[in-house]
């Protein structure tokens, strides 16, 4: 079943719960700069670890939580969580089985960022399922942050990744159908894009994040979205918090969305308020055509408070904390 159908069919928890689940009452800290609050308020270790992810990906968050509960760090957790979706051929927006570009090529974008601010990313990667793991290798084993295209693929192969055909029968069929009309315009709430982004805080209170995607379905050959661009698709600052984006990457890039959310949290906003402000920056631009596209953000701060917000309905976050792995429906801007 497609991810958005899951969302519509699932029983959804209101966004109020996401806010109500905060570790520390928002009221007390909202007015203070968060870095000041951090001096006295540290995440409640009883409620750590925690993991959140974009969309409805309970198996992925369960995997990440398994890593965290076993004492693993947040970096291992987000990598292994994202790998679950990359290997899931039924998910047509990530890894193997991802929908191709307009020429029938499946091209992946991914990135990862650790508690030290180290990061790695791959763009336009072909024939390798676990793009997030290649991104981690770029971070850990090269002097670079980003590898693209053939160079990224050759690096992956030389690092031991097996090349394979990522275009499954189902995705090929969907592409053949799309070619009949070949409309390029993304349609909201039609399964044509959906990044898996994941943020985790481990038992030590350290934060890491990752995201992985096959990008906008039927995109132009060579198109790269926000997901592998540090600061746009993902940003982690272990002092403050982290954010990851999904939706139309071009709009996220134009506002450097994830960095913006983290900076807003640095200035004292809660994760929920910061996500809302970042969406506002998009929809209030002069001549914004936001009715035609979706963007969603999820965020966590150092205290373990979380937030999520999108332009349109049906965006959700999966959150695993305190033994509860749940899908939380996001609040959204466009209620008209
Ligand atoms: N942000 C991704 C991109 O634009 C796609 C998505 O999350 O839906 O490539």
Image: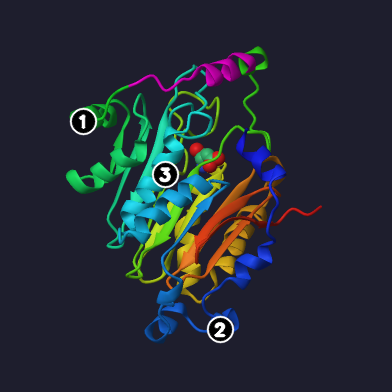
- Are the residues tagged 1 and 2 within 8 Å (C-beta)? no
Element marked by disc 1: loop
Q: Nearer the viewer, residue 254 or 80?
A: 80
* Quadrant (top left, top right, bottom left, bottom right) of the N terminus: top right
Q: Is residue 80 left or right of residue 308?
A: left
- Per the image, the residue denoted by label 3 is 82
Is residue 17 shown above or below 2? below
- Per the image, the residue denoted by label 2 is 31
- Per the image, the residue denoted by label 1 is 160
Give coordinates of residue 133: x percent, y percent.
31, 41
Residue range highlighted in magenta: 164-177
Alpha carbon distance from label 1 to label 2: 50 Å
Q: Is residue 324 left or right of residue 39?
A: right
Q: Is residue 91 left or right of residue 290?
A: left
Mark 1 crowdedness (10 Å alpha carbons): few <14, some 14-19, many ≥20: few
Is residue 183 among what the camera can see?
yes
């Amino acid at each position: 079943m497609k991810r958005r159908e899951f969302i519509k069919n699932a029983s959804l928890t209101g966004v109020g719960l996401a806010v109500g689940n905060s570790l520390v009452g928002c009221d007390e800290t909202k007015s203070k700069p968060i870095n000041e609050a951090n001096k006295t308020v540290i995440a409640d270790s009883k409620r750590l670890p925690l993991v959140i992810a974009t969309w409805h990906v309970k198996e992925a968050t369960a995997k990440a939580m398994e890593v965290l509960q076993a004492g693993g760090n947040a970096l291992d957790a987000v990598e292994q969580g994202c790998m679950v979706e990359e290997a899931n051929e039924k998910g047509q927006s990530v890894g193997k089985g991802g929908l191709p570009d307009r020429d029938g090529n499946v091209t992946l974008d991914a990135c990862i960022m650790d508690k030290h601010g180290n990061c790695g990313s791959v763009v336009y990667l072909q024939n390798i399922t676990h793009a997030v793991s290649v991104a981690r290798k770029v971070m850990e084993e090269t002097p670079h942050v980003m590898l693209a295209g053939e160079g990224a693929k050759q690096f992956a192969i030389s690092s031991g990744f097996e090349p394979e055909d990522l275009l499954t029968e189902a995705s090929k069929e969907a592409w053949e159908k799309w070619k009949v009309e070949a409309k390029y315009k993304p349609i909201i709430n039609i399964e044509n894009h959906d990044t898996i982004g994941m943020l985790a805080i481990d038992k030590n209170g350290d934060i890491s994040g990752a995201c992985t995607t096959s990008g906008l379905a039927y995109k132009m050959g060579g198109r790269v979205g926000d997901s592998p661009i540090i600061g746009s698709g993902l940003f982690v600052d272990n002092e403050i918090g982290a954010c990851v984006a999904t939706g139309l990457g071009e709009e996220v890039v134009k506002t450097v969305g994830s960095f913006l959310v983290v900076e807003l949290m640095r200035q004292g906003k809660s994760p929920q308020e910061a996500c809302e402000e970042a969406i506002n920056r998009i929809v209030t631009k002069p001549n914004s055509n936001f009715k035609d596209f979706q963007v969603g953000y999820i965020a966590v701060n150092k205290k373990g408070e979380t937030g999520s917000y999108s332009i349109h309905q049906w965006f959700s976050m999966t959150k695993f904390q305190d033994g509860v792995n749940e899908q939380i429906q996001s609040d959204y801007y466009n209620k008209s």
